[in-house]
Amino acid sequence: MINELTRTYLDAVDRALPGYVRGLYLVGSAVLDAWRPGVSDVDTVILTSRPAGADDAAALATVHAGMPDSPHLDGVYLEPALARSWPDDQRVVPHVVNGTFTADQPCGDLTPVLWLTLHRYGVRVRGPAVAELGVRVDPEAVRRYNLDNLRTYWRSRAATTRAALTKVDPDEPVEAGTVSWYALGPARLHHTLAHGDVISKAAGAYLGQLFPAYADLAHRAVRWRAGAPERFTAADLRAALDSVDRVAEDAWRRFGIRATRSSSGAGPGTRTVARGLSTPR
């Protein structure tokens, strides 16, 4: 299915803009052994031969509008200059989210973790081998991004969801995808901080190792992601939200201190990069 989708995209974009797409690489769940038909999208990095002009953007919008509804082919477009600098500041670049193309909005996927994933696990569909791209991974940027994401995104979202559950009966059924998302997402970031690597399905086992009280919930979340019929309740969702706070607090306690010491001019010998976040080879 993934191969068919990428062929469909390349055929369409080559007809619309001959010579424009010079590289296409799979990232995300498709390369992390976590892709699930009917649930997962196909995430990509797309290298182009030139910056996207207005006519290019219009043609790309048409191409993506004509792509299948499921799975979506999502991705980030990088012009030649950006494919040398590998920006991770979520700047405005052409990109596709949930199958919808946009060229004038910040790209939330343009992060250090994207380049870590491409560097370690990216799969070439078109273009030079990944090892020949010169992808730059800044371990300190990866660490800062994951810490900030845990605090400003995950904990904020968890607080909002928790507030919405105030009057919900603990036995009330809830969406399995929501529970799985909260239970596994922050654990993946914590693992990257600790080990300098990207995981997906293994996040369940990792959360259970960090906090055994959540091991059963994490196991069920992984089973659901794999297609098993798991039922979750509001009590499960509350537990998943609590795990977000525990994981974020632990990450900042273990790995955030390095940022504080570094920014305050710590003396010789202070480590500024978390264990495991050495430059990938």
Image (spheres, rainbow, N blue to C red):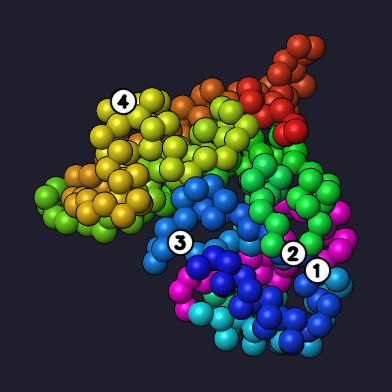
In terms of image quadrants, where is residue 184?
A: top left
Cβ–Cβ under 8 Å for marks 1 and 2: yes
Does the segment drawn in magenta span residue 83?
Answer: yes
Q: Residue 40 carries which label?
A: 3
Amino acid at the residue labelled 4: Pro
Disc 2 target residue: 126
Residue 4: % across, % down: 56, 72
Asked if labels 3 and 1 touch by Cβ distance under 8 angstroms, the answer is: no
Q: Earlier in the sequence, mark 1 or mark 2?
A: 1
The 10 Å Cα crowd at callout 2, few under 14, some 14 to 19, many 20 or more, is: some
Residue at the disc numbered 1: 22
Task: Look at 63% across and 74% down and name the residue there.
Answer: 7
Label 1: few (<14), some (14–19) or many (≥20) C-alpha neighbours in 10 Å: some
Q: Mark 4 points at which residue?
A: 212
Report the mark closest to the observer, 1 or 2. 2
Alpha carbon separation for disc pair 1 and 3: 25 Å
Q: Is residue 241 visible?
A: no
The tag earlier along the polypeptide, 1 or 4, is 1
The reply, left or right, for residue 270 in relation to residue 167 is right
User: Which numbered disc flags the more N-terminal residue, 1 or 3?
Assistant: 1
Quarter of the image containing the C terminus?
Answer: top right
Q: Which amino acid does label 3 sit on?
A: Ser
What is the C-alpha distance between the residues marked 4 and 2?
43 Å
